[in-house]
Amino acid sequence: MLQGVVKSAKDCAPLAGAKIEFWLAGPDGNYDDAHRATMTADKSGAYRFESNFPPNYSSRPPHIHIKVSAPGFRALVRQHYPKEGQTQGTFDLVLVPAG
């Protein structure tokens, strides 16, 4: 499980309704629609994502791709690298205002 809060870089205010996209390789090391998800942050900017632990593939360590966007802010694309055996993680996402 990966959870966190989407916040504004301007004042650390939570960004309710931010769109968060996740994608990761399935247990066979391939990307597919079963290992993609899109959700919105709740009224406190919080999100919670659950999936399989991502495998190593093509000499890359396990990772989860994350893209987050909200009106009036620049989109952010990052990767989360969980440690082997880790079943929970916290990953806050901070967006910079556009313009």
Image (spheres, rainbow, N blue to C red):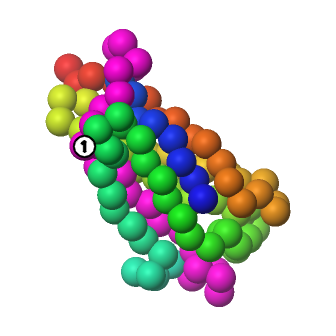
Residue shown at 48%/75% (left/top)? 35
For this rendering, which residue is in front, 75 or 84?
A: 84
Span highlighted in magenta in the image? 9-30
Specify the farthest residue to the front: 43
**Left or right side of 90 for 21:** left
Q: Which residue position holds label 1? A: 17
- Does residue 39 lie above or below 7 as drawn? below
The image shows residue 31 at horizontal and vertical percentages of 51, 78
Q: Is residue 26 magenta?
A: yes
Q: Is residue 76 above or below residue 88?
A: above
The image quadrant that residue 38 belongs to is bottom left
Foreground residue among 77 and 34: 34
Describe residue 87's horizontal placement relative to residue 45 as left or right: right
Residue 89 visible to an observer of this rendering: yes
Whole-percent x and y of residue 67? 40, 50
**Residue placed furthest toward the bottom:** 28
Farthest right residue?
85
Magenta segment main secondary structure: loop
Q: Amino acid at mark 1?
A: Gly
* Percent position of residue 13, x then y: 35, 21
Query: How packed is label 1: few (under 14 Cα within 10 Å), some, or many (20 or more)?
Result: some
**79 up-or-down from 93: above or below:** below
Residue at 81%, 61% (x, y): give it: 84
Q: Quadrant of the N terminus?
A: bottom right
Residue 7 shown in magenta: no
Foreground of the two, 48 or 32: 48
Q: Is residue 69 visible?
A: no
Q: Position of residue 12 (x, y in %)?
A: 40, 18
Residue at the spot 67% in from the left edge and 69% down from the top edge: 53
Say which quadrant the C terminus sits in.
top left
